[in-house]
Image (spheres, helix red, strand yellow):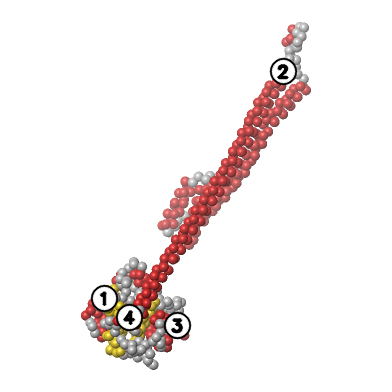
Amino acid sequence: MIKFMKLQIVARTDLGRVRTLNEDNYLVVHNIGADEPKEIFGQFEQQKLGSLLIVADGMGGEASGEIASEIAKLSIAAYVQENFTDSDVQFSDIIKILENSLIFAHEQIVDYVRENSDSFGMGTTAIVALVFKEHVFVAWVGDSRMYRYSKNGRITSHNYFEGNVEILTNDHSLVWGEVLKGKMTPEDARVSKQSNIITQSLGDVFKMPNPDSHIYPIYENDTILLCSDGLNGMLKDSEINELFNKNDDIEQLSLQLINRANSNGGNDNITIALCKVISGARYSQSEGTTTAEVVKGNGSRRIHQVNEAKIERKKRRKIIPVIAFLALIAVVFLAFSLNNYFKEKEQLETSVVEKNKKDTVLEKNSSGYNNREKSNTVDSQNDKNQLKRNKVKTPTNKPKNKEEQIIPEIPTTDTLEHKNHNDRDSAFERITPMVSSTTSTVVQNEEEVKVENHQKSKHIEELKNILKRLPKKYDDENMEKRFEKIKNDIKKIDMRDTLKLKRIIDDLRVFERDLETK
């Protein structure tokens, strides 16, 4: 015969000191197998299917946050009531039921918003805990939280605890994400101005929630606390631990927790649900196990092993993207290096080819120059020989008288014309290649000068037109300074420098555009 735990449950909600509307809600069901869920405060023996605790923190103000939290608590309870009917169900199936109950509640709120457009923007956080077979099963969306107070020792391995109080859930909030990264402490997150920014909620029409969940063992004298952020936002964890240590009676504890939150400011609605194990599985420190675990075998141990395996898988899943990212960087770096290598190789080959071409041209020019030198030398020698041949020779016979000796032989007109014609032809042959080369260069330079002068004229004309369009004075001091600077640059510029002239025109265009926008 299975022995059921004896529990005591207390739940309360309070408006706080600042808000005018309480948007929080809670629901406690001592036996979810009953035909109609009902609350029983005080001590009772747990029934076959366990007990259910729900806390929801509505948001939206005028957009009906209290309606969202009301829909959430009723939808969660109804879903669990309908789907959790077998006490022999696997623990993993219980967790799935709790997660699905949150998704079901989300869909109900979204349907309500679609039918009531004036409620657009409303939503709620929600946390649901099922106390069943010496374990607490918890699932949540948002920043509503669950604590465990126990003098038996901790059941978590993280550092989010204070004295005998430990946090069993991770808030879906911006600041708690920084806590998980090690960039904030829980206390830093609590007092942060961004502590009210949550990353998940029920009722968001644009985003489906992704609930988190856990399974924890609970022992005799343990107390479970579910609360909205109106409590843990106003109290340090050390204050919560202090009040737990002072109060064994959770009825008095619930009142003191709410009073302390209001004393510290009461900036938000405050809702709590407390569940204390009056009698149940006893914690055995020497064996590191519980009586219930010994009786049932290794069921709880297997759960812990499953949780550890999940943690290990999560670690591996976190490492895989890092490795993939590093591999991607390595591939990109290798591709970049290879690309640079082939570019440099191509440039080197191109430079070698260009150098060879230049060397070939230089060799040809040198050969042509030598040939021209040789040709000039030969032509010069031929000219000399021709001159020698054309010289008037002294007759071999001596003149018979003095008159014949004094008067030289005068060449005829035909002789002179023939000589001059030969001289012109040889000179023309030597000069022709040089003149043709020089003429082509001069023509090319003249064309470039014409184009450049045309561009200068065009730029100068454009500069004048822009200056004509611009006013002489400006009300804006910055615009006045900019225009003075441009005018100084114009005074200093050499109008023959096309590049500087174009740069000044670009500056004037930008100045003119900025002036139009103002």
Q: Could you tell which of marks 4 and 3 lies nearer the N-terminus?
A: 3
Q: Could you tell me which quadrant the N terminus lies in?
A: bottom left
- Closest to the camera, between mark 1 and mark 2, is 1
Badge 2 or badge 4: first in the primary sequence: 4
Q: How far apart are marks 4 and 3 (CA)?
A: 38 Å
For mark 1, does the 10 Å Cα neighbourhood hold few (<14), some (14 to 19), or many (20 or more) residues?
A: few
The percent position of residue 260, horizontal first and vertical second, equals: 25, 79
Q: Which residue occupies 32% across, 68% down?
A: 184
Q: Is residue 185 above or below residue 247?
A: above
Q: Which residue is denoted by mark 3 in the rendering? A: 107
Residue drawn at (32%, 74%) of the image = 156
Q: Which amino acid does label 1 sit on?
A: Ser
Depth check: 219 or 256 in front?
Answer: 219
Labelled disc at residue 110: none
Quarter of the image where one finds residue 119: bottom left
- Give the Cα distance between marks 4 and 1: 14 Å
Viewer-proximal residue among 80 and 382 = 80
- Figure quadrant of residue 417: top right
Mark 4 and mark 1 lie on one chain; the one further toward the N terminus is: 1
| Cα–Cα span, label 3 and label 1 | 48 Å
In three-dimensional space, the C-alpha distance between marks 2 and 3, rounded to whole angstroms, equals 126 Å
Please tell me whether residue 161 is drawn above or below residue 373 in the rendered image. Answer: below
The residue type indicated by label 3 comes to Glu
The residue that disc 4 covers is: 293
Nearer to us in this view, 134 or 333 = 134
